[in-house]
Image (cartoon, helix red, strand yellow):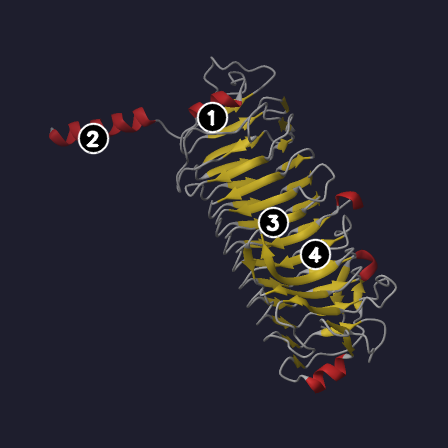
Amino acid sequence: MLRVVMVAVVLLVVAMRGEAATYHVDGARGEDARDGRSLKTAWRTLAKANAELRPGDTCVVRGGKYPEGVIAPVRSGTEKARITYAAYEKEKAELGGGDAGSVVLLADRSYVTVRGFTIRPVKVHDWVVQMSGAKSQHNRIERCDISDPEGYAPVVIFGGSYNTVIECRLHDTGHGEEGSGDCIVLNGGAHHNTIRGNKLFNGCHSQALIMNGAHHNTLVDNELYATKRDWAGAGFNLVLGADSNVMARNRIHDLGYITDQKCAIQIDTAGNTIRDNVIYKCGAFGISPQSYAYGGKRQVAEGNLIEGNTVRDCGRQGLMFVSKRDCISRNNRIVKNVITGAPADWYGANAWIMVFDTYHLNEPATPGEWFGNVFEGNVFFHAKAGEKDMVLYNHRGKAVTWSLPQLEKLYPKTFRGNREVKPQFANPGRGDFRVKGQ
């Protein structure tokens, strides 16, 4: 008898908790007083869904504009029972956010999925999609189209971890000014997040900014570009202690035109892996390890691996090493890259393929001080083999240039097995830079 009673109690508890449910929001025909369980009894607002959804629940949002629409669940999902917000299949649900600080706010929320929305803030928002706080973990932003022309960042992960942004379009941010607008920002120690398969474009400052101790994040298989030059900021910016991140198999092009200083990939930090990226038609630098002080904080590009990348047709240099004051770009490995193209002259001079700049160091350096950086197995090609101006060393004395064979002979510990060979790309006119025969 006791066993029967216990089973009954268990069944009653399960019934009280309820099973995972699917709810519906219809901004045109719904009413929040209904139960939300079907299209005919849909809720009207996302605010109702935010208050009601529990672990395992899904909210399906019908097409239409929701100018006040904000996704901000009052509770988290769990590892085995996520909370999901999804646009109704083949319908465009556009969220505006009203006067809220963010249109998607996952502050200290975990295991929430947001899928398939168009997000266009109706007013200026600094962070359109925000995953912030140490408890913001394991969230997923999938197949969303997010822009903020008058704001600063479509997606920000601040301190969060193990979140994923996948197959989204993040674009048009920074109101046409060089100093603002990043399509995605990893900040405040954000770690172990994955940014994969997205299109990041028209970010005036950069397409992806990794900063302030963000570490062990992975950004792979993304495309970074601009459709208009006055919105063409940098590609990846790694600054202020953003160490041990991975940027791999990304395609970066048509960027770096807002100023002549923008890089496809700028690395001011340590222990990062930059591998198998394709960079072409960028206005300034391709890949640039830089070391300097910013706001009183030292930044040193140290111990990074730059491997297997293709850099072609950059307006200035394919590789640009910078060291300033007491900050030295050192102990980086540059391995098996293809750095090529014949860029336009820079201020009437040869644009070179690589510049090693020590001009602003406190303690003067002399040509041949490579600070532990190693260049091994790369292909460098500018206009012709044996070109004497292939590499420039800029210091306080007269600048020095070398051909690649000269460097291999003079500095065998630094330059190993590099070649001057004009690579035959599969179809460069269509952006296919696979090298024939490899």
Q: CA distance from mark 4 to mark 1?
A: 39 Å
Q: CA distance from mark 2 to mark 3?
A: 55 Å
Q: CA distance from mark 4 to mark 3?
A: 12 Å
Query: Would residue 6 appear left or right of 328 to someone viewing this image?
Result: left
Q: Which residue type carries mark 2?
A: Val
Horizontal and vertical percent position of residue 79: 40, 42
Is residue 167 visible in this depiction of the protein? no
Q: Nearer the viewer, residue 114 or 371?
A: 371
Q: Are marks 2 and 3 in contact (CB under 8 Å)?
A: no
Is residue 421 visible in this depiction of the protein? yes
Q: Is residue 401 above or below residue 99?
A: below
On the rendered image, what quadrant is the C terminus found in? Answer: bottom right
Q: Which residue is mark 4?
A: 264
Horizontal and vertical percent position of residue 192: 48, 52
Q: Which residue is mark 3?
A: 209
Which residue is at a point 70% across and 35% down the rendered structure image? 149
Q: Residues within 10 Å of mark 1 (few under 14, many from 20)?
A: some
Counting residues from the start of the chain, the first of labels 2 and 3 encountered is: 2
Q: Which residue is mark 2?
A: 7
Horizontal and vertical percent position of residue 287: 68, 62
User: Which residue is the extreme one toward the right?
Assistant: 348
Of badges 1 and 3, nearer the viewer stands 3
Query: Would residue 263 appear left or right of 15 to someone viewing this image?
Result: right
Q: Which residue type carries mark 4?
A: Ala
User: Residue 50 got which mark?
Assistant: 1
Indicate the quadrant where residue 421 lies. bottom right
Q: Nearer the viewer, residue 310 or 285?
A: 285
